[in-house]
Image (cartoon, rainbow, N blue to C red):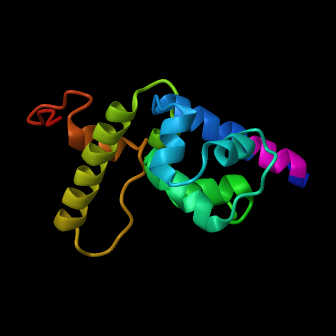
């Protein structure tokens, strides 16, 4: 991410525009959903305005992404370290529709809840790309394991 504030706001605007495109929303519709004026949203997308955390939260809600994602893009929060957040990665994927993203997130979170219920010790869940997840979900076609999704 750029450290120059002008570049940061331009990058934030580009990110919001990309998310709006992924959600198949017009500028006018997103501004209505977010409760901000059409010209103000246009200026944010072009990197001309520096939106407050509250405005970013409204935009995030309208786009159905986490406010934290926009806060990181704006440089308000540091990117999370450690284990990558699969939910964030799904929501950022430009190659699938908003409906597909929401379905994947729901499935992923249901698997996480199931794992946490089966393993109440509080130990870490296997990584999203780990063999444990693949074997447990039947992805490799292990005998006795059927895919549930």
Pinpoint residue 47: horizontal percent, then vertical percent. Answer: 79, 44
Pinpoint residue 4: horizontal percent, then vertical percent. Answer: 91, 52
Front-lying residue, 149 or 25: 25
Residue 118, compared with residue 11, is above or below; it is below
111 relative to 60 in the view: left or right: left
Residue at 54% over, 45% down: 31
Front-lying residue, 143 or 4: 4
Pinpoint residue 17: horizontal percent, then vertical percent. Answer: 63, 35
Front-lying residue, 18 or 51: 51
2 relative to 96 in the view: left or right: right
Residue extending farthest left: 144
Say if the magenta span includes residue 137: no
Residue 149, compared with residue 44, is above or below; it is above
Residue 84, compared with residue 30, is above or below; it is below
Residue extending farthest top: 95
Say if the magenta span includes residue 10: yes
- Residue 86 shows up from this direction: no
101 relative to 72 in the view: left or right: left
Pinpoint residue 149: horizontal percent, then vertical percent. Answer: 18, 35
Q: Magenta segment, which residues?
A: 6-11
- Residue 71 shows up from this direction: yes
């Amino acid at each position: 991410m750029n450290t120059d504030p002008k570049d940061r706001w331009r990058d934030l605007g580009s990110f919001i525009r990309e998310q709006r495109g992924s959600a198949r929303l017009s500028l006018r519709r997103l501004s209505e959903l977010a409760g901000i004026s059409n010209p103000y949203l246009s200026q944010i997308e072009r990197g001309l305005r520096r939106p407050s955390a509250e405005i970013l939260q409204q935009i995030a809600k309208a786009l159905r992404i986490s406010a934290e994602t926009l806060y990181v893009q704006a440089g308000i929060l540091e990117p999370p370290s450690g284990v990558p957040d699969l939910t964030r990665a799904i929501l950022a994927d430009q190659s699938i529709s908003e409906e597909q993203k929401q379905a994947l997130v729901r499935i992923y979170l249901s698997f996480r809840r199931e794992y946490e219920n089966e393993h109440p010790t509080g130990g870490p869940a296997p990584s999203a790309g780990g063999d444990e997840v693949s074997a447990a979900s039947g992805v490799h076609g292990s005998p006795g394991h059927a895919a549930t999704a």
